[in-house]
Image (cartoon, rainbow, N blue to C red):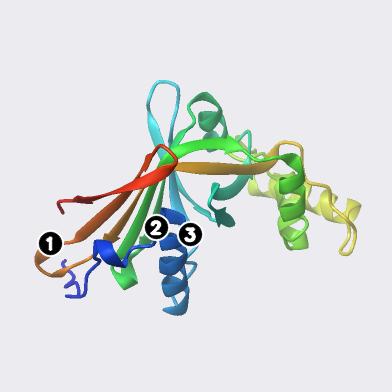
Amino acid sequence: MRARYRAQGLDEQDLAPDPYGQFARWFADASASGLHEPNAMIVSTADADGRPSSRTVLLKQYDERGFVFFTNYGSRKGRELDANPYASLLFPWHPVARQVIVSGTAERIGRDETAAYFRTRPHGSQLGSWASEQSSMVASRAELDRLYAELAARYPEGEDVPAPPQWGGFRVRAESVEFWQGRENRLHDRLVYVAEGAGWRIERLAP
């Protein structure tokens, strides 16, 4: 199973000065293309012994400080990031023959920032954050539904739901960001921003 990639590529002179500006350009392109959930990314973490794990989450914020996603801090990824802050983010934009790969370190964002985002979530998602102790064993689906129903009765639609203390955001501060553009004959373009002092160095990698 092979896909043919396009001839149009990615040149150094066309890049933004920093990876966040370049990401904004490509994210806008991915969104305009009709790609389903362009903010979906694969987050890879490793535990204290170096054993990796991956899962798909949604990017919720990004700026020059880094890329932000939200989770239960007691989840597997939360526990692993507390033990080992190094993380990788992969945006697999296959329909437009592009990928973005971010490598860096993750840190928890402030509670004020978490609370501000939590208030923008749909009511059901707010309740779900309380009902689910993410990655922990649950007796049955019925038990999960019962917990949700109890919360729905406690916090009916229209009532303020506080952000759970064990739930919040991680910001991944990039140390390198690779922009991958599929090209013909598998000679893909791979341009990487590498943090260097207060700025960024751009490297081209062989495909």
Which mark's residue is nearer the viewer, 1 or 3?
A: 1
Image coords of residue 181 (percent x, y): 26, 64
37 on left or right of 161: left
Q: Tell me: residue 151, above or below residue 156.
A: above
Question: Which mark is first along the chain, 2 or 1?
Answer: 2
Q: Residues within 10 Å of mark 3 (few under 14, many from 20)?
A: some
State which quarter of the image contains the N terminus.
Answer: bottom left
161 on left or right of 92: right
Badge number at residue 40:
3
Q: CA distance from mark 1 to mark 3?
A: 26 Å
Instruction: Give me the residue at 49% from left, 67% from top.
Output: 37
Front residue (pair 137, 87): 87
Image marks 3 and 2: residues in contact by CB distance under 8 Å? no
Question: Which mark is first along the chain, 2 or 3?
Answer: 2
Residue 181 appears in the picture as rendered = no
Instruction: Give me the residue at 42% from left, 74% from top.
Output: 29
Image marks 1 and 3: residues in contact by CB distance under 8 Å? no
Q: In the image, what residue type sits under mark 2?
A: Pro
Callout 1: SS = loop
Instruction: Give me the residue at 32% from left, 72% from top.
Output: 96
Q: CA distance from mark 1 to mark 2?
A: 24 Å
Residue named by callout 2: 17
Q: Residues within 10 Å of mark 1 (few under 14, many from 20)?
A: some
Residue named by callout 1: 187
Callout 3: SS = strand
Which mark's residue is nearer the viewer, 3 or 2?
A: 2
Callout 2: SS = loop
Residue 189 appears in the picture as rendered = yes
